[in-house]
Amino acid sequence: MTIHFFIDGSFPHGMAAAKRRLCYAKGLMAEGHEVEVHVCHKCFEQGDNDGFPEEGVYQGIPYIYICGKYKHKGKLLRAFDWLILDYIRSFFHALKSVYKDEAMYVYLYPIFMQILLLLVARIKGAKIVKETCEHPSALGNINSRWHKFCKWFEYKFVMPHYDGFIAISRELDKFVCRYKSPKAESIIVPILVDTDICDEDFKGVESPYDVPYIIHTGTMHEQKDSVSKIIRAFARFKKETDSACKLVFTGPHANEQCKYISLMEELGVRDSVELLGLVSTEKVLILQHFASMSIIYKSDNLQTRNCFPTKLGEMLICGIPVITTTVGDSNMYLENGKSALIIEPDDEDTLVDYMNKILVDKELAAKIGMEGRRVAEKYFNPIYQGKRLANFFSNLLVNRYSGGGKTLA
């Protein structure tokens, strides 16, 4: 079967969403399916370059930027593209690309684009599946009336028309099951991580720092990542232990415009915090390889209860000891004191104590890192999950579960 990915983010490289899509593709292709990727919006600023053409093949996966890669400089032309042209081009491209008895996988949020792709699926006789990695009500300007109306419209009039859903967590599957058609199927697929990243040869490579360091990759959103709590705990740890440890951030917000710099200065740890910005995949792997630990801090809110952080899987597969919280699905897989160190949200005392334990007790740190890696290899493996996904898509096509509305957990 050919499965068409319709997305609005960059491919093949990018943030967590891009990594998840690549893992899906590898898993599905390992089961004999063909995958084609169609990017529905321009993703890059003028002058940016990820080293890939607008159309090509990456690791056996054909991809195309339907509307081109680069955004216009002018705001009016950007708006015209985003609100009108991208939709028209994507609709007619999908009509030409998708055929009967194929599948469409949708990983994007704009409601009108979803409606157009649903229309294509019905016209062409294809099955269509929606990815759900975040609770839609937790994204955007959540307090505006327009946002609330759009979400209500999406839940009541768009979601029931999908043939299936892929949810990243149990809570999101409950949400999906509330609004999907009774005939639609759903499957829970946790975070995925490319196991190949841990096969890099680091012989002859030196650690970027001559002191232990804590690594944090990706976004730095307070609601999702609780960065201020990590910084406060780090400052307290430094003060109480007089450790030379550093805190290292990479990602789009880790630069001199970072909103947390004033907090770092207030707490007296600015000189101990590295803001590296967006760095190459190779450098991220080196940073992860030599890191002493990572803190994946999830406070309790709508977004964190429903999501499942990709960075957790990346740290685990690299054998990095992880400190995380009890919020979300990670606790279905991780065991406190064995494969991770787990705290309750806002328990700063235990967090500081665990930071000290990992740095002082090398044997414990190595054990936790090794067990965490085993968890990732077993449950977050694209090949293992790819078999489940392949069966899910095949069953949709033959209507084996027609009318059942089951969740494949």
Image (spheres, grey):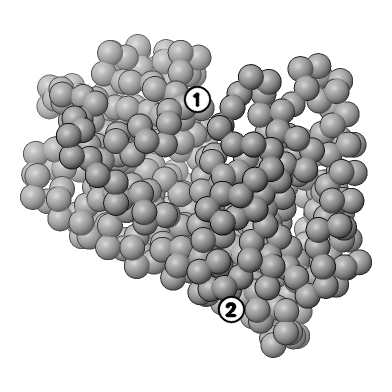
Q: In this view, does 104 lie above or below 210?
A: below
**Local SS, label 2:** helix
Question: Residue at left 41%, top 15%?
Answer: 261
**Residue sitting at x 19%, y 30%:** 206
162 left or right, relative to 37: right
* Quadrant of residue 276 within the rendered picture: top left
In which quarter of the view is residue 106 placed?
A: bottom right
Quarter of the picture containing the N terminus is bottom right
Q: What element carries label 1?
A: loop
**Residue 136 coordinates in the image, percent (x, y):** 68, 49
Looking at the image, residue 249 sits to the left or right of residue 403; the answer is: left
Q: Is residue 345 above or below residue 178?
A: above
Residue 127 spot, x, y in % from top left: 77, 70
Badge 1 amino acid: His
**Residue position marked by numbered label 1 in the rendering:** 253
Q: Which of 347 and 292 is in front in this view?
A: 292
Amino acid type of the residue that numbered disc 2 sits on in the rendered structure:
Asn
Q: Name the residue under label 2.
A: 391
Residue at (29% x, 51% y) in the render: 199
- Which residue is more in the foreground, 68 or 128? 68
Percent x, y for residue 222?
49, 33
Q: Which of 321 and 35 is in front in this view?
A: 35
Q: How many marks?
A: 2
